Amino acid sequence: MILLEYNNRIIFETFRRAISSEKRAALDVTLADFDGVQFHISTPNPDARNVILYSIQWPAVEELLRHGAQKDLEKIYGGLVTDPESGYQVSLQIDLDNLPAEPEKLPLKLSFLKRHLLAAPFMKIFGAIHNKQNPTEVVVIPYRTQTDEAFFIKPEGDRCIVVFSVRFSDKNDRVLAKVFLQEFADARKSMRNVPAVQYTTGEVPGELAGVAGVPDDDEVGFVSFVLFEQSLLPKNAFKTINLLQSFRNYLHYHIKCSKAYMHERMRDRVHTWLQVLNRARIEPFEKKEKKLASGRSFKRR
């Protein structure tokens, strides 16, 4: 199993080249990311190619901004935050001739824009639990509106429960997901300080009873993570959020890899059976001609 990158590689490479190059080239890059996210990197003014506008469009942004994402972006990116580009919710403006301190780290920081937006509600709840503020609000983030999927953050004492609704259009994917996620539950028996994981289908988990907007059709499964105090500490929160925000992509990636592996094994097995059948095929009988010692043919009359 592998962990997917938490940042966007194309954004990282685009800004790395733009910052390291002495030539100021015009940019107009539009790209998509997981969860229906769209980025746009452009130079709005052709006469000022040193100024780059970097924007994100994502239906979940409005809800994330309501839970403190705007404040987090201003803390992380400072003066780079600017008025949003038309058709986008958040924009950053980068002046290549006036870069902030440590410009070599800027491409990586910019490629984490989606991650920082999505981290806001987690940081809000984790911080409240760590500071013993006893939060009770259940945060709902519809991060995939095109498939009606969301995640729910529910504080509960000194713990935090994160529930993902995951939609499987293929019934075979639901079976593979159940087997795959069972490994998460079994791993806790041999490991310490890891979240408890539970996968349920067919009914809404008890943690979400009474919460509005929870899908309950047959194609939806629910993955619940119970995060204990160790995972919520400030020194561990960054890694915890990274792993949580990439969970759905991680799950679907490995389901597809498992299906590809099984298809490959089936093709290999069919190839092996064909070889066995070919070796077992009876060759047609041909009557051989008999010859004498002198080399002449011998025919019995």
Image: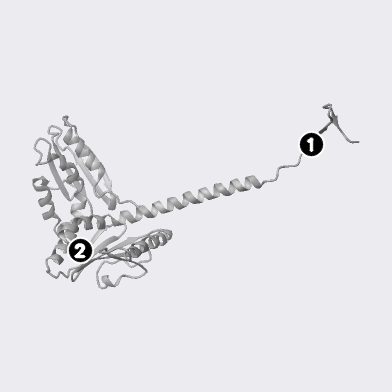
Closer to us: 101 or 60? 101
Report the side of 226 relative to 203 (left or right).
left
Closer to the N terminus: mark 2 or mark 1? 2
Q: Amino acid at mark 1?
A: Lys
Residue 35, numbered label: none
Q: Quadrant of residue 50?
A: top left
- The residue singled out by tag 1 in the image is 288
- Asked whether the beta carbons under mark 2 and mark 1 sit within 8 Å of each other, the answer is no
Q: For the C terminus, give its image quadrant.
A: top right
SS at mark 2 in the image: helix
x, y percent for residue 29: 23, 39
Q: Residue furthest right?
A: 301
Q: Amino acid at mark 2?
A: Gln
Report the side of 216 relative to 7 (left or right).
right
SS at mark 1 in the image: loop
x, y percent for residue 129: 15, 66
x, y percent for residue 82: 11, 46
x, y percent for residue 205: 30, 70
Q: Residues within 10 Å of mark 1 (few under 14, many from 20)?
A: few
Q: CA distance from mark 2 to mark 1?
A: 84 Å
Q: Residues within 10 Å of mark 2 (few under 14, many from 20)?
A: some
206 lies above or below 37: below
Residue 230, numbered label: 2
Q: Quadrant of residue 61?
A: bottom left
Report the side of 93 relative to 275 (left or right).
left
Q: Residue at x 73, y 42 (%)?
A: 284
